Image: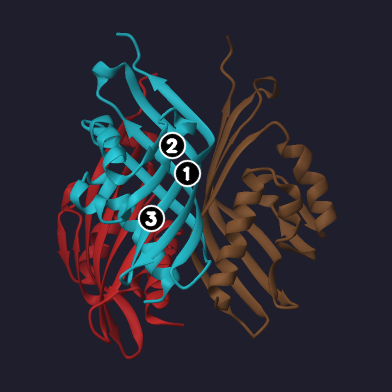
Chain colours: A brown, B cyan, C red
C-alpha cells in the first residue's frame, strides 16, 4: 500500500474508531505528542494524546456521533511527513437532559502526518468550520 | 488500475446503480452467490443475488434513494480476495401513502470481495448502524 | 502522484475553493473553455470559464455553501484525457431576505478532464439530480 493510501486509511480508522467509541483503537491513529486544535468549536487546543482524550471521552459519552471525511488532499512533504486537508461533516445527537438535541457541522480538517517505524500517524490536526448548527431540545 | 482502486470503483458503481435504479447494472457488481446481511435494518439476510433482488427491487420501487459511501478501508487478503469497510449514509424518501416520509441512516458496510476472470465483485456484505431515524408522514 | 489521484485532488480543490469562496483558486481547476451544464438546477449552460463565473459568483455571494463529492469513478481515456462520475450532495443556506432558507440536493457530476502542460483541469461538467429540496423561509 502506498503512502497516500496508508494515510487515507489512517484517517478512515480515526473516523470509525471515533464513532464506534473504540477508544483503544482511536489512540493508535495519533502520535503521542499530537497537537489538536478544535478551538473553532469552543473546544480549545490540546498538546498530547492523553490531554485530548481526557477532554474527548467524557464529552462524547452518551452522544451518538457520525463523522464523515471527504475528498482528501494529501501531499507527501518528505518520505516520513505529509500534510492533508479533508472536507468533513459531523452530526452529534445528545441526551435530551443536556438541553441540546443535535449539533450538525461542516468544515475542513487541516492536518499533518508523521511516519514512525513504518506507521503513519496524525501529528497535528485543526478543524475549520463552514457552518455549525446547534438544535436545542424543544420544550414539551 | 490497481486492485484497491478497482474495488473502490466497484462499490462506487454499486451506489450509483442502486440510486439510479439501474438494476441490470446493479447485478454486475455482485458475485452470483453473494451473501447480504441487512438484518440490522429488519431486512434479514439473503443468499444469492436473485434472492436479494427479489427483496430489494419491490422495496425500493417508488422510493427516492441516496446512498453514499465514505472512507473505504480496503485490504487485499490474497491476489483474488479482499475485505473492506465503508462508512455510509442513506436517505430514503417514501411515497406519502406508505405513512413513512423518510428513513435516514448512518453506519458501516463490512464486506468481502472476490476477483473472478479479472473482475472484482462483492462476495459478502453486512450493514451495521450507528443511527437510524424514521420520520412518519405528518397528519394533515 | 498518479493521474487518477491527481484528478481526485483536482476535484477536491474544486469543492474546497467553491465552499471557501476562493474564486482565484476556483479558476485554476478549469480549462479556460470549460463547458458547464447545470440546467437540471435551472442554471443553464455556460461556455467558458468567464461566463460560468459571471453567473456563479453573484449567485453564491452571501450564501453559505457545502458541496461534497463522493466515490469518484475516474477513467483515463488517453494519456491526456479522462472522464469521471462523482456522487454529490450540496447544502446552501441563503440570506433570509431571499425568501429561501435552504436548498439541499443530491446527484452526480458527469465530467471530462484534460491534461495540459502536465496539469489536469475540468473540461466539461454536467450535474444530474436524484433529489432537490427547497425550503422556504417560514413566515413569522
Q: Earlier in the sequence, mark 1 or mark 2?
A: 2
Q: Are marks 3 and 2 in contact (CB under 8 Å)?
A: no
Q: Residue B38 — which label? A: 2
Tell me the subunit letter for badge 2: B
- Kind of element beneath mark 3: strand
Q: Which residue is mark 3?
A: B122
Say whether marks 1 and 2 touch (CB < 8 Å).
yes
Q: Is residue C101 visible?
A: no
Query: Which chain contains the residue that carries disc 1?
Result: B
Mark sitting on residue B126: 1
Q: Circle 2 — which element?
A: loop
Measured Cα–Cα span from mark 1 to mark 3: 11 Å
Placement of C58 over or under C80, stated as above or below: above
* Inter-mark Cα distance, 3 to 2: 15 Å
Relative to residue B108, is residue A83 drawn left or right?
Answer: right
Residue placed most toward the observer, C110 or B38: B38
Q: Position of residue C124 (x, y in %)?
A: 21, 69
Residue at 40% across, 62% down: B114
Instruction: Assess disc 1: are there few (<14), some (14-19) or many (≥20) residues with their C-alpha within 10 Å of its C-alpha.
Output: some
CB within 8 Å, label 1 to label 3:
no
The residues bearing labels 1 and 2 have C-alpha atoms spaced at a distance of 6 Å
Density class for disc 3 (Cα within 10 Å; few <14, some 14-19, many ≥20) is many
Residue at the spot x=26%, y=50% of the render? B26
Quarter residue C109 falls in: bottom left
Q: Residue at x 76, y 56 (%)?
A: A27
B25 to the left or right of A59: left
Amino acid at each position: 500500500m502506498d503512502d497516500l493510501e496508508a494515510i487515507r486509511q489512517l484517517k478512515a480508522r480515526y473516523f470509525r474508531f471515533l464513532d464506534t467509541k473504540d477508544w483503544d483503537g482511536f489512540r493508535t491513529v495519533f502520535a503521542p505528542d499530537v497537537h489538536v486544535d478544535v478551538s473553532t468549536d469552543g473546544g480549545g487546543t490540546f498538546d498530547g494524546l492523553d490531554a485530548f482524550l481526557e477532554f474527548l471521552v467524557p464529552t462524547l459519552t452518551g452522544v451518538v456521533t457520525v463523522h464523515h471525511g471527504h475528498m482528501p488532499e494529501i501531499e507527501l512533504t518528505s518520505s516520513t511527513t505529509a500534510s492533508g486537508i479533508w472536507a468533513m461533516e459531523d452530526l452529534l445527537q445528545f441526551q435530551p437532559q443536556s438541553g441540546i438535541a443535535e449539533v450538525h457541522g461542516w468544515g475542513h480538517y487541516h492536518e499533518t502526518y508523521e511516519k514512525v517505524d513504518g506507521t503513519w500517524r496524525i501529528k497535528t490536526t485543526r478543524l475549520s468550520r463552514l457552518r455549525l448548527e446547534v438544535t436545542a431540545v424543544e420544550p414539551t
